Image: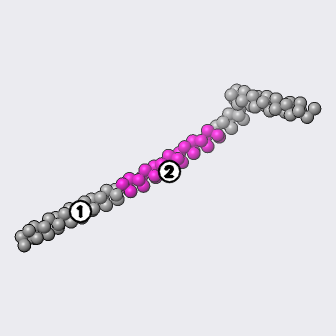
Amino acid sequence: MATLTTQIASIRLKINNLIERNRKLAQAIEQKEEELKLVKEENELLLRRVKDGEERIVALKTANAMLGSDEYKTKTKLKINALVKEIDACIAQLT
């Protein structure tokens, strides 16, 4: 009978240990979920900042184009030349 009592006590101890371990793991999961939520919020904030930055770049490029920046003029000339060559090639095929 003493052996049975010892086994029952051992099983109870193991069950209590498992319950405690389960509780700690549940707390760890909850903590990780909270950390994940914070990281997602930070990620969304950074994505908004990147989008705002990209929009600002476009606005600045447009402003530079209106002011007649040399870089824009060069790019525009290169695009126009490429289009003219493409049109010439099309005309040559038609004749």
Nearer to me, 60 or 13:
13
Please tell me whether mark 2 sits on a helix, a strand or a loop: helix
Instruction: Count neighbours of disc 2 (C-alpha within 10 A) and say few if under 14, some if 14 to 19, many if 20 or more.
Output: few
Nearer to me, 90 or 68:
90
| Name of the residue lying farthest toward the bottom | 1
| Quadrant for the C terminus in the image | top right
Residue behind mark 2: 44
Choose top left, top right, bottom left or bottom right for residue 84: top right
The answer to if 35 sits in the magenta stretch is yes
| Quadrant for the N terminus in the image | bottom left
Question: Of circles 2 and 1, which is in front?
Answer: 1
Choose top left, top right, bottom left or bottom right for residue 8: bottom left
Instruction: Count neighbours of disc 1 (C-alpha within 10 A) and say few if under 14, some if 14 to 19, many if 20 or more.
Output: few
Q: Amino acid at mark 2?
A: Glu
Please tell me whether mark 1 sits on a helix, a strand or a loop: helix
* Image location of residue 74, percent across then percent down: 72, 27
| Name of the residue lying farthest toward the right | 95
Report the disc number at residue 18. 1
Choose top left, top right, bottom left or bottom right for residue 30: bottom left
Looking at the image, is mark 2 or mark 1 earlier in the sequence? 1
**Disc 2 + disc 1, Cβ < 8 Å:** no
Q: Residue at x 72, y 35 (%)?
A: 66
The part of the chain drawn in magenta is 32-59
* Image location of residue 79, percent across then percent down: 75, 31
Q: Amino acid at mark 1?
A: Leu
Most prominent secondary structure in the magenta stretch?
helix
Q: Residue at x 88, y 33 (%)?
A: 93
Q: Is residue 71 left or right of residue 91?
A: left
Q: Is residue 53 left or right of residue 26?
A: right
